[in-house]
Image (cartoon, grey):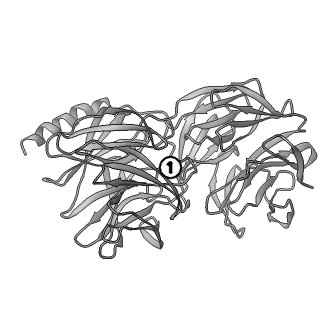
Amino acid sequence: MKKFPYVRILFSTLLLSVIVPLAAEAAPGDLYVGGLGAHVVYKFTPAGVKTTFASGSFTADSIAFDKNGNLFVSDTQNNQVIQITSGGTQTIFATGLTPAGLAFDSAGFLYAADSASGSIFKYAPNGSRTTFATGVSGPFGLAFDPSGNLFVSEVNTNSILKFTSAGVRTTFASGFHQPLGIAFAPSGDLYVVDFASGSIFKVSPAGVVITPAFAMGLSGPRHIAVNPVGNVFATNFGTSEIFVFTPAGARTTFASGIGAGGLAFAPAAYDFNQDGKPDYVLYNAVTHQTAVWYLNNNIFVGGAFGPTLPANWNVVGVADFDADGRPDYLLFNSTSHQTAIWYLSGTTLVRGAFGPSLPNGWDLVAVGDFNADGKPDYVLYSPATRQTAIWYLNNNVFVSGVFGPTLPVNWRVVGVADFDGDGHSDYLLFNSSTRQTAIWYLNNNVLSSGLFGPTLPAGWSVVGVADFNGDGKPDYALYNSAVQQTAVWYLNNNALTSGAFGPSLPANWSLIAP
């Protein structure tokens, strides 16, 4: 107990050195929008809350994320492509083109349409350029299908072109009126924004343009994106709006009063194999071995061993500490109170670094970005006082700290996510005695309100939280240690909408993340 006054003084003193960044964090499930002449890239939570992700002298039109979480922007004013890291750092990636559409292939190469030369350029991750295709008359939108074929909207011929990975070109569909943005749906259909007719068309995998149009009566639609559950987002240039359509075509206004630039969804968190879907992290208490199980929603698709932990160390959470777009392990030694970060490339340990040591009586319980600087922060908990605290980090370096809310008896923090879509990280709480869950909505470290979530069946506990079904809303990852069964509960904020069993674990293994 004598340590607490020291901790409080330490937090109060170091709070003065908090750095407020110019960029918000690139968060999974959020929609990013190029602001055109406003010289910004906007970020929208699934609930439609808007913040500015990045700003500068660029004119942001088409945008695309690479598999490491970096955002690439067609800067049409300065004839270049800008790269913006998840933390908001901007660099010039490519010059010498008039960029239109952007798209990444599965190997991580960037394809950029050059509207001036009628070429499609291919860029390696190091920025070196080759010419993939020439002679395209007004290239604009780019999109890859799951087989690696590149589709290009050819504005001047009112067609959609298809290129194999070897560059063989065919006409996939025609008869449009200035086709611009294109995007694939989970069903395999291609959506095409038709600027002059004010329509959105759906084209089957066989190249058949489905009539009537998927949507009509728009005013200059330019860009399009489809989320993992099949909802279609489109920018409407004539009214400066973003519309969202259900797969059945029902339309609502998602946002208004913004430029009608490109659209892109941020990659998934806890994604070790870079397929855009969260994965399980497992731990074997006998061998201290970790493993990652790759998932498609709740379905096991593959796995790989991760690094083995030293004695007395545990994985507390997973986050991208070094901003390379890949998840890292956050470790804690409850004996020495030392923290550490293991930087990973997939499941391979690249290097490690110690983080700050915790004061006596405090445990490390979760990780999340609470001050919106694009960098993961620690969540601490004192069992003696039930006080929480947040330590703000720059990679593995302690910057400052503040106290968070105090928990009621028998409750603990089991995860961090933005449940209400306001752009702020919230606490997910679990009461192991009653099996009740709850969500505490935070504004940085300040408790705004709280709601009960669903109650778990006997034998089950909440391990963590991630967006498993790609609807932009956090879901519960559940585990039953008695039968070694996992499950996913799909939520809409704090309300349970459905559930599904996940894979069962082998003997001696437990689920530790997300």
Name, please, the residue furthest toward the bottom.
457
Name, please, the residue furthest toward the top.
96
Residue at image location 69% in from the left, 44% down from the top: 262
Query: Image quadrant of residue 71?
Result: top right
Res 447 visible: yes
Q: Percent from the top left, x then y, of residue 126? A: 63, 27
169 relative to 510 in the view: left or right: right
If the image is split into quadrants, where does the C terminus sit?
A: bottom left
Residue at image location 57% in from the left, 33% down from the top: 84
Task: Give the labeled residue for mark 1.
Answer: 271
Within-10-Å neighbours for mark 1: few <14, some 14–19, many 20+? many
Residue at image location 81% in from the left, 63% down from the top: 204
Above or below — where is 205 with respect to 355? below
Looking at the rendered structure, the number of numbered marks drawn on it comes to 1
206 relative to 343 in the view: left or right: right
- In this rendered view, identify the residue nearer to me: 259 or 209: 209
Above or below — where is 396 with respect to 301? above
Q: Percent from the top left, x then y, of residue 183? A: 73, 53
Query: Image quadrant of residue 3?
Result: top left
Q: Percent from the top left, x then y, of residue 192? A: 79, 54
Q: Percent from the top left, x then y, of residue 81? A: 68, 30
Secondary element type, mark 1: loop
Above or below — where is 473 with respect to 335? below
What amino acid type should be assigned to the residue bearing mark 1?
A: Asp
400 relative to 194 in the view: left or right: left
- In this rendered view, identify the residue nearer to me: 216 or 498: 498
Res 370 visible: no
